Amino acid sequence: MTPKRVLVIDDEDDIREVAKTSLEIMAGLDVILAHNSGEGIQKAEIEQPDAILLDVMLPDMDGVSTFHKLQSNPATQHIPVIFLTAKVQASEQRRFATLGIRAVITKPFKPALLAEQLLGALGWD
């Protein structure tokens, strides 16, 4: 069986690498990396991942705007998105919930739990 593929969009090199290692080792996922929104949107279209782990705070376009671009594109609107964010205030959580994202994982995340959180949010467990 082919492993599920997850696109991780985050501008921090260490976050991308830790997420990649965690998801590959703990869940056997195939991980694709993008360092900004533009690259992430392009890779989502081309690679057609099974899910996207998207940082909310990105330098070129924030995660909410990136999510809207993904949702408005017929080639990517079906891909479930999980936000990765340090913004944990209740008002932000409510705002994210109204967007239609699958889940929110807070930073800093525990590498040993990231795969479990992602799999549970997507119903892949």
Image: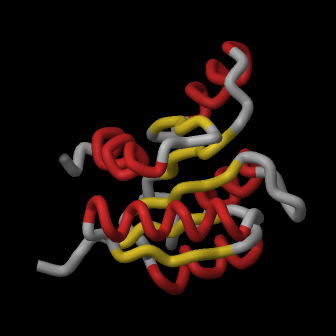
**Along the line of sight, the residue nearer the viewer: 63 or 57:** 57
- When the figure is inspected, residue 86 is found, relative to residue 94, above or below; the finding is below
Residue visible at 79% across and 49% down in the picture: 57
Q: Check the image and name the residue furthest to the top.
A: 90
Q: Is residue 39 left or right of residue 46?
A: right
- When the figure is inspected, residue 112 is found, relative to residue 50, above or below; the finding is above
Its colouring scheme is: secondary structure
**Along the line of sight, the residue nearer the viewer: 76 or 16:** 16
Query: Quarter holding the N terminus?
Result: bottom left
**Along the line of sight, the residue nearer the viewer: 91 or 110:** 110
> In the rendering, at what x and y percent does residue 118 appear?
38, 47
Q: Is residue 34 left or right of residue 44?
A: right
Residue visible at 71% across and 36% down in the picture: 86
> In the rendering, at what x and y percent does residue 94 appear?
63, 19
State the image quarter where residue 11 is shown.
Answer: bottom right
Residue visible at 32% across and 67% down in the picture: 25
> In the rendering, at what x and y percent does residue 5 appear?
36, 72
